[in-house]
Amino acid sequence: MLVFTDIRGLNLESGLKRAIAAIMVDISPADIPLSLGLRCQGLGYRSAIALKQAANQAQAPPLLAQQYLTKLVAPVPPPELEQYWCYQGTATTEGWLEFCLEPMSLKAWMDLCQDHFATLPPRQFPDKLGKTPLTFRFQYLQVRCRQLTELADSCQPTGPQQWFFERLELPSWEQTLLDCLVRFSLCLAQGDFSERLLFQLGQAFWDFHRYCPLFAWQRTQPRLFAHYRRWLQLIHVLFVACLENIYGVQ
């Protein structure tokens, strides 16, 4: 069942909360419980709103969740799909609402992330700067990521550069990268970069570097090569954004 939310920046969470609150009575978006979905391949969220509301109603959480989902589902797709995020919505037998971002929307969101972080003004959060010296580990990871990005770009200067999320299953290290990217978008919305975020990005990139056979796919799987080349470009943009806004390194 497809659920659509309007596009307002990187914060997917706020859009889902507004959509759920719109079908409720006297509940604001801020009061909607929502968290990252751990059982969804790709990018997903889950809400315990039916479990929360069932405590004050005579209906069981699974039935209430199904009613909420029916209200959320659009009878027909909106006329301008590019103005909406599209989720696959599910009501679980435990009473949770789950939303998994559809591949086309996920690709658009990834592109939006790269555009936003690539144009993020440096020193946007000056109170975070200069408190800790930049470690060799982060310097090395950022330089290594840049070198791999440049090498991948030189191997495929032209040709397809699209994301490829239509696969049945993502490897665990790519799922970790997605989770890290969501945290980045939330930090951007809240105006808070932290060293912990940089540590998470560093570990996610290290796993990518270790497990992704990027250059082996250049000839045999060009679509996958293009996909992970995009990942490299995005990771490098995130490194630069972090180093600029935590350490003032440009």
Image: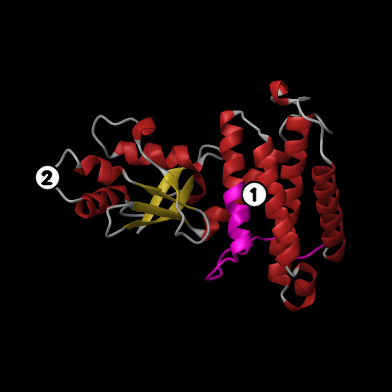
Dot 2: element: loop
Near-viewer residue (76 or 24):
24
- At label 1, counting other C-alpha atoms closer than 10 Å, the crowd grade (few under 14, some 14-19, many 20 or more) is some
Q: Residue at x 25, y 54 (%)?
A: 66
Near-viewer residue (8 or 194):
194
Q: Nearer the viewer, mark 2 or mark 1?
A: 2
Count the marks: how many?
2
Q: Residue furthest left?
A: 58
Q: Amino acid at mark 1?
A: Asp
The residue where tag 2 is placed is 58
The picture places residue 26, in percent across and down from the top left corner, at 25, 29
Q: Amino acid at mark 2?
A: Ala
Q: Residue furthest bottom?
A: 220
The residue where tag 1 is placed is 111
Where's the N terminus, which quadrant?
Answer: bottom left
Q: Residue at x 62, y 50 (%)?
A: 110
Label 2 – label 1 distance at C-alpha = 44 Å
- Bounds of the magenta segment: 158-180
Q: Residue at x 52, y 49 (%)?
A: 82
Q: State the image quarter where residue 2 is shown.
A: bottom left
Q: Main secondary structure of the magenta part?
A: loop
The picture places residue 48, in percent across and down from the top left corner, at 32, 46
- At label 2, counting other C-alpha atoms closer than 10 Å, the crowd grade (few under 14, some 14-19, many 20 or more) is few
Q: State the image quarter where residue 55 is shown.
A: top left
